Amino acid sequence: ILPSMIKNKQKRSEIHSKLKQQKKVDKRKKVKARDAAEKRAVELGEEPPARQVPRTIENTREADETVCKPDDEELFAEIETDEFSTVLKGERTPKVLITTCRFHSTRGPDFIKELLQVIPNSEYYKRGTYDLKKIVTYATKKDYTSLIVVHTNRREPDALLIIGLPDGPTAHFKLSKLVLRKDIKGHGNPTS
């Protein structure tokens, strides 16, 4: 009889608790029997029965062919020919040029000062009326590895354009709710 079929609430809860208790006892007996079988097998010098492995998302997942394995030779060959391999190996120090969009804002320079303190080997170049193409060629000639353009809108920095020199890639990041260090209550000063 299922407890849910009983209409009397008190009787139903009694039977439900008895069934729950019985289930607990059965589970305990099963665990003890398994442990005893393991112990007996070890005493007789036999191989104990294999423990059951629970089904999880991890062990039922199909192998993904697109995941790179750490011992993949093709991956190491690709890293060797990568355009950033000299920077990643430490053979070349990255140099970053930071500039603004044409009409920068009041909070833009403060944000750039913080970027200059955070990013090592970075310099600020005042944009003026120069086109971005001219600044890219200038930065490439001066051996910069990256160019960061801080874009502002309504007197607030709202985007970062990061250009890998000389041939790319280019990434565009949107900034929202920018909080400068000086706006944080009880902020500390950076150390070198």
Image: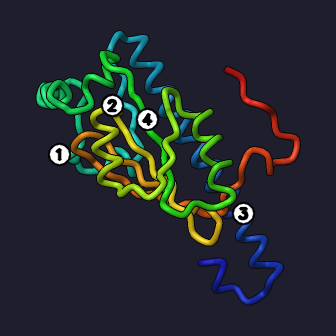
- Closer mark to the observer between disc 2 and disc 4: 2
- Closer mark to the observer between disc 2 and disc 1: 2
Callout 4 secondary element = strand
At label 3, counting other C-alpha atoms closer than 10 Å, the crowd grade (few under 14, some 14-19, many 20 or more) is: few
Check residue 142 in the rendering and tell me which mark sits there, or answer none: 2
Residue indicated by mark 1:
65
Residue drawn at x 68%, y 59% as measured from the top left: 106
Callout 2 secondary element = loop
Check residue 129 in the rendering and tell me which mark sits there, or answer none: none
Residue indicated by mark 3:
18
Callout 3 secondary element = helix
At label 4, counting other C-alpha atoms closer than 10 Å, the crowd grade (few under 14, some 14-19, many 20 or more) is: many
- Closer mark to the observer between disc 1 and disc 3: 1
Residue drawn at x 44%, y 58% as measured from the top left: 129
Label 4 to label 3, Cα distance in Å?
72 Å
How many badges with numbers are in the image? 4
- Vertical order, 135 against 79 (above or below): below
**Going from the N terminus, do you reach mark 4 or mark 3 first?**
3
- Closer mark to the observer between disc 4 and disc 3: 4
- Closer mark to the observer between disc 1 and disc 4: 4
- Vertical order, 176 against 170 (above or below): below
Percent coordinates x, y for residue 147 in the rendering: 39, 43
Residue indicated by mark 4:
96
Q: Nearer the viewer, residue 183 or 156?
A: 156
Label 2 to label 4, Cα distance in Å?
11 Å
Q: Are marks 1 and 4 in contact (CB under 8 Å)?
A: no
At label 1, counting other C-alpha atoms closer than 10 Å, the crowd grade (few under 14, some 14-19, many 20 or more) is: few
Percent coordinates x, y for residue 1 in the rendering: 59, 78
Identify which amino acid the numbered label 4 is placed on: Val
